[in-house]
Amino acid sequence: MSVPSYEARREAEAAMAARRELGPEYEAQIAAGLAERVEQAVWQQHQQGQQAATQLELARIRDEKLNRGQRFALTIISLGTGIPITAIAATQVDPGLLGVAVSWAGIVAVNLVFNRSNRSNRDRR
């Protein structure tokens, strides 16, 4: 249970004082006015919660687009560097297939580490 704000307490006290001054015949109007102010406060809090949720969703979408772009760039760079690395490894190592396998294993490892680090960063949010 939350503690009412200073303003809420002050309004409730003012409503009780008005009821004492005006008498029980005005009780319904005083209660209706107080209920209306409470409804407005609840509505404002709801709107603020909705805005915060919308901002969080927009930030998540922005981060996902950035992450997707980084993965795509790494894929292109891996393929671009993989071709000359494959050619060098195939001609410089005996047997050539061993050099190709080791070079591509390194490229795959770099991509896996990058994707895992991005996934763990995303999970922390």
Image: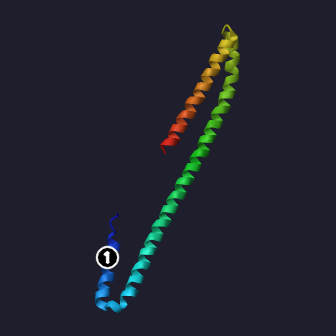
SS for dot 1: helix
64 versus 45 height, above or below: above
Name the residue at 41% across, 78% down. Answer: 35
Q: Residue furthest top?
A: 94
Q: Position of residue 67 (x, y in %)?
A: 59, 41
- Percent of width and height locating residue 63: 57, 46
Q: How is the image coloured?
A: rainbow
Relative to 16, is 42 above or below? above
Q: Amino acid at mark 1?
A: Arg
Above or below for 25 versus 100:
below
Residue 42 is situated, as x and y percent measured from the top left of the image, at: 44, 70
The part of the image, by quadrant, that contains residue 88 is top right
Residue at x-position 53% and y-position 56%:
55
Residue depicted at x 62% and y 21%: 105
Tell me if 125 is positioned left or right of 84 in this view. left
Please name the residue that numbered disc 1 is placed on.
10
* Residue 39 sits in quarter: bottom left
Q: Is residue 82 left or right of residue 52?
A: right
Give me the residue at 59% from left, 45% from top: 64
Q: Which percent across, then down, holds residue 33?
A: 41, 82
Which quadrant does the N terminus fall into? bottom left
Q: How many marks?
A: 1
Residue 33 shown left or right of residue 76 in the figure: left
Residue 42 against residue 66 in the figure, above or below: below
